[in-house]
Image (cartoon, helix red, strand yellow):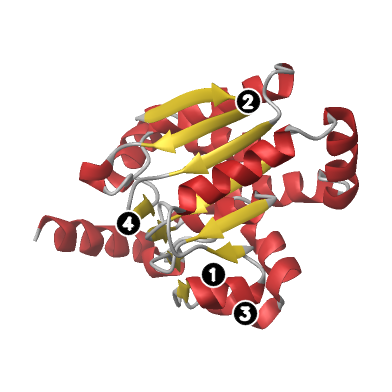
């Protein structure tokens, strides 16, 4: 589930499914999208903070849950896709607190954040190609912009993990926090929320620039991702993953 609270202008979105390493279900994606979209309309929400649990930010998509959704509706209509679109359209600043695992979408959503804090235990990895899939959330565009082609290839295509230290060097993480990373991230979010909101919104928009190309890339990724779900190598990779998971 997603625990949502609002305090001093900061809407905190806490991933709270520790028994499944915060693997994201369709219901959780829906709650996240609802919250981000509400932030665009609610002047009381001046900043979003996304955080997880001790030692786990998120293990990424709950594959079994996703396949159930994808079996009933087009991939483009699934809750995860709605969340990805909401990320691109979010008008309020995003802060993330990462402690432990940040896998798949747990990695790519960080590229949309304005500030990212991580504990030394952060473990960032995107195993899309290993599953016969392609990167999502616009990461195929944002990754090279952020860290250059070679490093983005290493993360998104090879699937090599990033430690907190390496993620900081590459610009994916702003600061490594030894203790109470959530508290540090919340303090930053409150600092953002305390700024003049119109000036903050305009300044962030200037830094982000035109998001048209990003929206187009997200839609391109979604289309390719959907096609890949029926590819023989993807089906084999999913079967191997689910067998390993059951074992």
Residue highlighted by disc 4: 55
Q: Earlier in the sequence, mark 3 or mark 2?
A: 2
Q: Nearer the viewer, mark 1 or mark 2?
A: 2
> Please, what secondary structure does the residue beneath circle 4 have?
loop
Whole-angstrom CA distance, mark 3 to mark 1, is: 9 Å
Viewer-nearest residue: 108 or 235: 108
Element type at mark 1: helix
> Which residue bears the numbered disc 2?
8
Tag 1: Cα neighbours inside 10 Å, few (<14), some, or many (≥20)? many
Q: Label 4 vs label 3: CA separation? A: 25 Å
User: Which percent across, then down, holds residue 80?
Assistant: 49, 37
Residue 92 as seen in the image, left or right of residue 76? right
Residue 156, label in figure: 1
User: Quarter of the image holding residue 143?
Assistant: bottom right
Which residue matches tag 3? 151
Give the alpha-carbon distance from disc 2 to disc 4, as whole Å. Answer: 26 Å
- Foreground mark, 4 or 3, reads 4
The residue lying furthest to the left in this view is 247
Which element carries disc 2, helix, strand or loop? Answer: loop
| 1 and 2 marks in contact (CB < 8 Å) | no
Whole-Å distance between the Cαs marked 3 and 2? 37 Å
The residue mark sitting in front, 1 or 4, is: 4
């Amino acid at each position: 589930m997603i625990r949502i609270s609002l305090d001093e202008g900061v809407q905190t979105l806490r991933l709270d499914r520790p028994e499944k390493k915060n693997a994201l279900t369709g219901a959780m994606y829906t709650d996240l999208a609802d919250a981000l979209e509400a932030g665009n309309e609610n002047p009381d929400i001046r900043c979003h903070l996304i955080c997880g649990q001790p030692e786990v930010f998120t293990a990424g998509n709950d594959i079994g849950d996703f396949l159930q959704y994808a079996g009933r509706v087009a991939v483009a209509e699934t809750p995860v896709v709605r969340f990805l679109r909401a990320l691109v359209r979010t008008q309020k600043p995003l802060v993330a607190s990462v402690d432990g695992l940040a896998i798949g979408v747990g990695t790519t959503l960080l590229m949309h954040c304005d500030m990212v804090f991580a504990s030394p235990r952060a473990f960032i990895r995107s195993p899309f190609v290993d599953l016969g899939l392609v990167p999502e959330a616009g990461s195929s565009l944002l990754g090279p912009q952020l860290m250059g082609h070679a490093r983005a290839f290493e993360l998104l295509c090879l699937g090599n993990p990033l430690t907190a230290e390496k993620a900081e060097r590459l610009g994916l993480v702003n600061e490594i926090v030894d203790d109470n990373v959530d508290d540090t991230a919340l303090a930053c979010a409150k600092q953002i929320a305390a700024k003049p909101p119109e000036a903050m919104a305009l300044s962030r928009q200037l830094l982000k620039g035109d998001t048209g190309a990003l929206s187009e890339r997200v839609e391109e990724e979604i289309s390719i991702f959907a096609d890949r779900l029926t590819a023989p190598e993807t089906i084999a990779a999913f079967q191997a993953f689910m067998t390993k998971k059951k074992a």
